[in-house]
Amino acid sequence: MTTTINVGVIGAGRIGKIHISNIVYYMPEARIKTVADANLTPEIEGWAKGLGIQNVSKNAEDILRDPEISVVLICSSTDTHADYIIKAAQAGKHIFCEKPVDLTIEKVKAALAAVKNAGVRLQIGFNRRFDHNFAHVRELAKSGAVGQIHLVKITSRDPAPPPPAYVKVSGGIFLDMTIHDFDMARFQAGSEVEEVYATGAVLVDPEIGAAGDVDTAVVTLKFANGALGVIDNSRKAAYGYDQRVEVFGSGGALTAENDAPSQVRLSDAQGVHADKPLYFFLERYKDAFVTEMKAFFKAIAEGTETPVTGNDGLMDLAIGLAAKKSLAEHRPVKVSEVL
Amino acid sequence: MTTTINVGVIGAGRIGKIHISNIVYYMPEARIKTVADANLTPEIEGWAKGLGIQNVSKNAEDILRDPEISVVLICSSTDTHADYIIKAAQAGKHIFCEKPVDLTIEKVKAALAAVKNAGVRLQIGFNRRFDHNFAHVRELAKSGAVGQIHLVKITSRDPAPPPPAYVKVSGGIFLDMTIHDFDMARFQAGSEVEEVYATGAVLVDPEIGAAGDVDTAVVTLKFANGALGVIDNSRKAAYGYDQRVEVFGSGGALTAENDAPSQVRLSDAQGVHADKPLYFFLERYKDAFVTEMKAFFKAIAEGTETPVTGNDGLMDLAIGLAAKKSLAEHRPVKVSEVL
Amino acid sequence: MTTTINVGVIGAGRIGKIHISNIVYYMPEARIKTVADANLTPEIEGWAKGLGIQNVSKNAEDILRDPEISVVLICSSTDTHADYIIKAAQAGKHIFCEKPVDLTIEKVKAALAAVKNAGVRLQIGFNRRFDHNFAHVRELAKSGAVGQIHLVKITSRDPAPPPPAYVKVSGGIFLDMTIHDFDMARFQAGSEVEEVYATGAVLVDPEIGAAGDVDTAVVTLKFANGALGVIDNSRKAAYGYDQRVEVFGSGGALTAENDAPSQVRLSDAQGVHADKPLYFFLERYKDAFVTEMKAFFKAIAEGTETPVTGNDGLMDLAIGLAAKKSLAEHRPVKVSEVL
Amino acid sequence: MTTTINVGVIGAGRIGKIHISNIVYYMPEARIKTVADANLTPEIEGWAKGLGIQNVSKNAEDILRDPEISVVLICSSTDTHADYIIKAAQAGKHIFCEKPVDLTIEKVKAALAAVKNAGVRLQIGFNRRFDHNFAHVRELAKSGAVGQIHLVKITSRDPAPPPPAYVKVSGGIFLDMTIHDFDMARFQAGSEVEEVYATGAVLVDPEIGAAGDVDTAVVTLKFANGALGVIDNSRKAAYGYDQRVEVFGSGGALTAENDAPSQVRLSDAQGVHADKPLYFFLERYKDAFVTEMKAFFKAIAEGTETPVTGNDGLMDLAIGLAAKKSLAEHRPVKVSEVL
């Protein structure tokens, strides 16, 4: 790569900071020219300057209007994603946008239309596809290691539930948490989801129930290629973050177990003891955040399709909405019903 | 135990022979007086005599009429189970009957009524409850190791599908294969199943589909205590018999992995290689067949309830029928609908 | 096999009883005609009769003189092994003898000479060669899975030390405990040991030190084929019986881990917990005792060499004596020095 | 930390570059002012400038004479280490020096004396103490998890042998490769080594034998606290870098298994397959190189003793020399003989 890509980042919250640090430390192919955050604080400003970033602003327009900037990262709150995608696309910039694009099909479609019209690239931040374990499962499955895929099984449990206040604005478990698993399911199956059946229960925190959501769920999927899928979720696993995938097919099965801080085992009079899994997504997907961004810049530099497209964002949302509908109406729901 | 229990065995097919050998080799507390098989062959006769068994007959009546025999094992074909239970109960004998009791709710209820009227004991052959792994999971969960149970997950895959001809008479995958998993789910959850949702696909053998059945399935369960359950089945796992259970609760998770022939690992230039799981149920549940029968004789000797009752047989069948209905009608089905 | 082998067993202590039950339960090819024990008790007599054994005697001569008996199992105390081998050989009987044959090279050589002169078969009870894990390692190594063997590593630790009184008569750790590992080392290396270097320490029980022995040891071996070997021993592992083998070669490594009672793992807020290894040799080598005896009867029936010969017993003893000498003289010792 | 530490690095070969990148990327508490390399190439110069390093020189004096530089990293060839330590100490600079300090006891002692006289800090580059697995083993053992330590076992195998030419100048396997394991053994035992017995063989590459060295070795250690130790080495493991540690004590055992690229397992008709270990030290100890350097800067900033002192370098060398002597003289050698 001979030219450095000039990048603007909109939103310097937790996830924005992760991407910013990763680019500064690990991606000489890109340079962050401007960071914009509507709630800019001296703390953010100092942190950005400490990383050697030239411009810090309260105004995303400083990025959108800058002709030197060819790539925009949208890491602001979900309700602003679609608008920024549209504006960035109209400004002719390639876009990396955090998930979800939006909580409504209409706004996602509008954003994708803008991207299409502008002929720019868009990648959605489904980082788990880049996890060393899950990517390796997919790579082996694609190479035929398990033959024709019959079943994709995903276990996805958080170490602790979000505050009930967050649950209300997040769109609920299927749009906030399971949406990652829907994306993983489509990625591993290599096929679209046609039908969803969702069951749920409130077993972790009654306030989540009071907020109209569930905290424990099992979701069954039917894929277009005939395979089945199943996801189980919990908002709270006492032993930490549980992120496992199994792909079963005519030739065998691939399983990805959790990562742990060490490979140490203690054998004593009580038993044999090992570490819990890595605590949460910052630990587990540390490297995946780097790999996802490098893959994005590679696609931009080489002019190829991004590895997670706007259509992925649309389909994952549609499955989430179908799951919500399934739970509410207590019946299997076709994804086409909500699209 | 001071008195030896005199036993008659009806049916000397594959499963009957397993129980007969186990009793002869491992259970001094019991003595097999008579083996009856409607299709008695010289081979069976020779085999039984070789084990020191006194009487071999074509006629189950030789057992039912024998006042010395206090316990009857019913290992004949499924369609004869209910009738033999009724006759044995009327003859005042305690009964061990292979699963399923019958494929219809009515006949099972009639058999249970006969048992109740006679005041005899009945145990159904759900042997997996006695597997060293699954029993240990239940024991730990009961002791509170994972707190309140939120989810029971069962993976159950056979190494090879049965012949399509068998599929037709077996009642289909849910009554033939998954019924074991329904029993396991109830056992692990410590609660009855209230609702079932079943999905299925024909991915292993088109002839199974032609016979009106599926060979791959995912079944979601709702338990009376609020917990969720999920079972995935395949008629063919390339790597052999896959029998795993996971119990997840407020305090953690218990997982039972497969048994393998050895603990040997080979590390070479290609990777690290270990054994496949034990091939099939004869290997995997070898000891469980012994443990189940010893538990039965213990209950008889001590006059206590058997560990797997007639009601278990009834409820497991009901879940199977509800799963069939769910698949056929493409909707969640309450177990009460079929009872 | 058409003829049943008539067997006499000398010694009905712990190990004798294991072999007797195993033969009665699992080996229709053999029949125990007579059990002789110098310290015959009513308990032993009742137990043997309960198993259907015809004759029970205080006098081993009742076995040695019986022309119907073609095979003798010697399970009496170590100091009587060599004499009984000689007498049984002179009586023309095939012999299975528990380890060690004797604690002196001279008596072992005399016993082997008697066996050779009589042209009978002799198998020594090094049961670990028949363990499912270790046998599988050897089988894979022989098939070339790890290329040319460079190193054999053995970990062998007991759950609890023997009483100090036993330590005195047992010949010490190298002749009592490590002798099993010496046999395993030769078995896995497929080569004789030429030189030994032993270090030891008293870390478990000072009384073992007072009895002139060590309770913790590391022994280095040099094999005739150029490979190296290393054994580590402890009389007390807090987590139970630790029996592992590793064979490393030009093409990779084979490792045999411990067996455990179950494959269950508990993940909770403290970590991930699994079972300790099977408690001791009765549990770990339960099946190996059966396999070893079946292999013996097979060799007798087919007239082939036994899988563990008298020469194995001789060489294992010689390595043990060389290890003792090495520890005492604080230098590497050639096995040829003690032969 | 309020003041940034100014650092000069002598030697920009493979290991020098690792430290330089790590400091630039991960250690804001330090700033590399000057890199000096006697064999400075345009490639090194470009690489250093690309990392934003101010000065690049052919002359280590540019570092030693610079009053702004308070810390020197010595990453040049082994034969220059002792001299640079002396010069840097005389210049009043704190020192991080790669292992080994030197191949002779005399020069190491001279270097340590200079450090002591100058009152500066010295850390030796035994990076494995900072490996997440080995550090965790030590932490648990120190906390009493296995009681009193009885045995330290280390397996250390390289994926491929060095060129025979290197073997000649490296001082041989014990000073080049096993020296890391001697350091690990002392670290884990929490005690000094008093006696060494080394065996070796040429099984990997005859040219290594021709160069007067062995490529396969087993080394037994006796610690001052009474514990035993054993290390096995090979210059070539077909499956890659094998780096395991076991600490056994009165209360149990700690084992550290290898790290692997993923936690993915493939179950197919042939068996269950997992990844090989991480390929070599750059992959396995990637994070350990960072942790070691951060620990060094922390000690400097806080004015405390470094975690790996000059005395560690001296003792590790002495054990290596004792091992060489043991192999040559075919007898156990006290470490005090070579000090």
Image (cartoon, coloured by chain):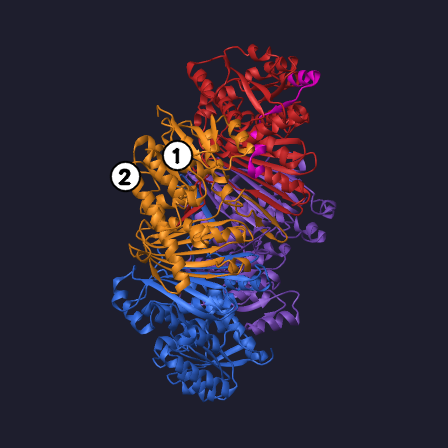
Chain colours: A blue, B orange, C red, D purple
Q: Is residue A15 visible?
A: yes
Magenta stretch prevailing secondary structure: helix
- Frontmost residue, C207 versus A242: A242
Q: Is residue D2 visible?
A: no
Q: In screen coordinates, is C110 left or right of A322?
A: right
Q: Secondary structure at mark 2?
A: helix
| Subunit bearing disc 1 | B
| Subunit bearing disc 2 | B
Q: Secondary structure at mark 1?
A: strand
- Horizontal and vertical percent position of residue D162: 67, 53
- Frontmost residue, C55 versus C295: C55
Label 2 Cα neighbours within 10 Å, binned few <14 / some 14-19 / many ≥20:
few
Magenta residues span: C111-134
Mark 2: which amino acid? Asn
Q: Which residue is mark 2?
A: B117
Q: Which residue is mark 1?
A: B72
Instruction: Give the numbered dot on residue A270.
Output: none
Which quadrant is the C terminus of chain B positioned in?
bottom left
Q: In screen coordinates, is D168 left or right of B111?
A: right
Same chain? Circles 1 and 2: yes
